């Protein structure tokens, strides 16, 4: 505890007082440190969603057409866009 001696003399405190203050500050900072670590690790795990392959996109478009969610004209237009992106 020799590193606390200069501070103790500067603030006119006994070393045990500084130890108590140090522990209290550490207890106050601990939740902040935990939150920062949790946020950093959660950002690392989440990334951009995987991009579906061309065949997967064409299959999804075909299913939309079969379920009559897109019209024939929309189907043809989207199919051309997907194929032109290859």
Image (cartoon, grey):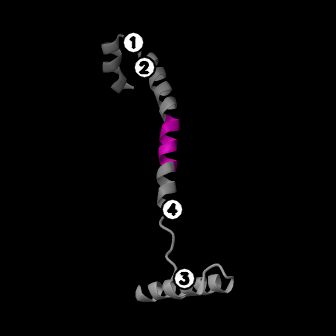
At label 1, counting other C-alpha atoms closer than 10 Å, the crowd grade (few under 14, some 14-19, many 20 or more) is few
Residue for badge 3: 74
Cβ atoms at labels 4 and 1 below 8 Å apart: no
Residue at left offset 45%, top offset 16%: 17
At label 3, counting other C-alpha atoms closer than 10 Å, the crowd grade (few under 14, some 14-19, many 20 or more) is few
Residue 77, horizontal then vertical, whole percent = 49, 85
Q: Which residues are magenta?
A: 30-38
Distance CA(mark 1)–CA(mark 3): 79 Å
Cβ atoms at labels 1 and 2 below 8 Å apart: yes
Cβ atoms at labels 2 and 3 below 8 Å apart: no
Q: Secondary structure at mark 4?
A: loop
Q: Is residue 51 above or below residue 22?
A: below
Distance CA(mark 4)–CA(mark 1): 48 Å
Residue 55, horizontal then vertical, whole percent = 53, 88
Residue for badge 2: 18
Cβ atoms at labels 3 and 4 below 8 Å apart: no
At label 4, counting other C-alpha atoms closer than 10 Å, the crowd grade (few under 14, some 14-19, many 20 or more) is few
Of residues 55 and 50, the one nearer the viewer is: 55
Regarding residue 1, the answer to whether it shows in the image is yes
Q: Secondary structure at mark 1?
A: loop
Regarding residue 86, the answer to whether it shows in the image is no
Depth-wise, is mark 4 or mark 1 nearer the camera? 4
Distance CA(mark 2)–CA(mark 4): 42 Å
Nearer-N-terminus badge (4/1): 1
Distance CA(mark 3)–CA(mark 4): 33 Å
């Amino acid at each position: 505890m020799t590193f606390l001696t200069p501070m103790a003399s500067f603030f006119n405190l006994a070393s045990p007082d500084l130890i108590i203050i140090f522990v209290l500050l550490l207890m106050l900072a601990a939740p902040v440190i935990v939150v920062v670590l949790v946020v950093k690790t959660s950002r690392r795990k989440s990334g951009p969603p995987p991009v579906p392959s061309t065949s997967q996109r064409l299959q999804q478009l075909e299913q939309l057409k079969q379920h009559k969610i897109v019209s024939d004209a929309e189907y043809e237009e989207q199919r051309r866009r997907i194929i032109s992106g290859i």
